[in-house]
Amino acid sequence: MRLVLLLMMIIIISKSFAAEDLIIDQVREAELKVANLESALEESIRILDSKNLYIKESEKLVEEKTSEVNHLQSVLLTMKNDSSWANEKLNRLEEEVRLLWDTARNNNFELHTLEAKAQDAEKRLKNTKSRVETMAAIVTEQWIQVQQLEQALVIAERGIEEVKRKVSKCYFLKFFKRQFGNLLDDGWKMLERNWSAVKQYHHKLQGFVKNEMQKWEYTAAYANKEVVFFVASALITFPTLSVGVFLLNNFC
């Protein structure tokens, strides 16, 4: 019967290793997404800087054109007061003034358009930055959970190795195996038949653990499927392991 318990513990630990590999893959995928978002963030910043530079140059050009218009208007006013100035020259200057005003209006329109685009780019930049920070926080939290799971698995492995060592030295178990080997085989077959029931119980236990963790403010943030799976496995594995160690310490 103890050998059956040992086999059950080994199977459960193997399931825990599979869960750890799944978490590590998810962490790596999240890190890749963060790297892609950071690259997009850098590209958005570069585009925003170039647009800001263009806006400054456009503002400078508008100022220059406005100064030219004011100068031409002053010259035009002077020429109108001068009766000796030819009407043809006056008309040409008026046309130049009109063209300069049209250019200034177009530049103002482009300036407003660029400012609107710059504001939109800034909003997208803030959203991207927020997503990057959120992904970084998720990656950090999942990596901490992986480390905690690895530490727990190391402790469980040490316990199993200790049980194996004591089992190999336990004369009572050797005698029991020689005398009741058929019973152990029957027990193993019964364990295989009941394994589906054990998995169903483990699934229900995960639901119970998740509900209990969500009830408490300090544990609700950690009620994800990896942590719930580990806690449910620990509730099944550690008591059994403790009983096995107790029996070995007292009867071997």
Image (tube, rainbow, N blue to C red):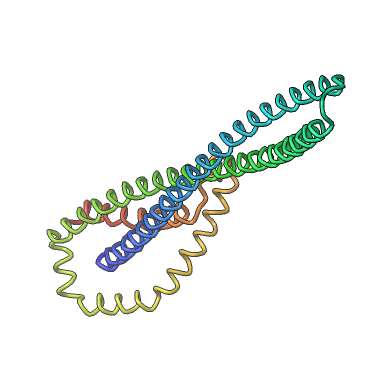
Asked if residue 227 lies left or right of residue 187, the reply is right
- Residue sitting at the far front: 84
* Quadrant of the drawing holding the C terminus: bottom left
Asked if residue 228 lies left or right of residue 125, the reply is left
Can you give x and y, in whole percent of width and height, for residue 123 in the image? 63, 41
Q: Quadrant of residue 94?
A: top right
Q: Residue at x 46, y 45 (%)?
A: 38
Depth check, front residue: 70 or 79: 79
Can you give x and y, in whole percent of width and height, for residue 85 in the image? 82, 25
Q: Residue at x 50, y 44 (%)?
A: 41
Question: Across the whole image, how many numbered discs are drawn on residues?
Answer: 0
Depth check, front residue: 12 or 65: 65
Can you give x and y, in whole percent of width and height, for residue 47 in the image? 53, 42
Query: In the rendered view, would you say 76 is above or below 123?
Result: above
Query: In the rendered view, would you say 227 is above or below 116?
Result: below
Can you give x and y, in whole percent of width and height, for residue 240 in the image? 34, 57
* Quadrant of the drawing holding the N terminus: bottom left
Q: Residue at x 48, y 66 (%)?
A: 201
Q: Quadrant of residue 2?
A: bottom left
Depth check, front residue: 88 or 95: 88
Asked if residue 129 lies left or right of residue 17, the reply is right
Depth check, front residue: 110 or 99: 99
Query: In the rendered view, would you say 53 is above or below 83?
Result: below
Q: Residue at x 49, y 46 (%)?
A: 135
Asked if residue 105 lies left or right of residue 161, the reply is right
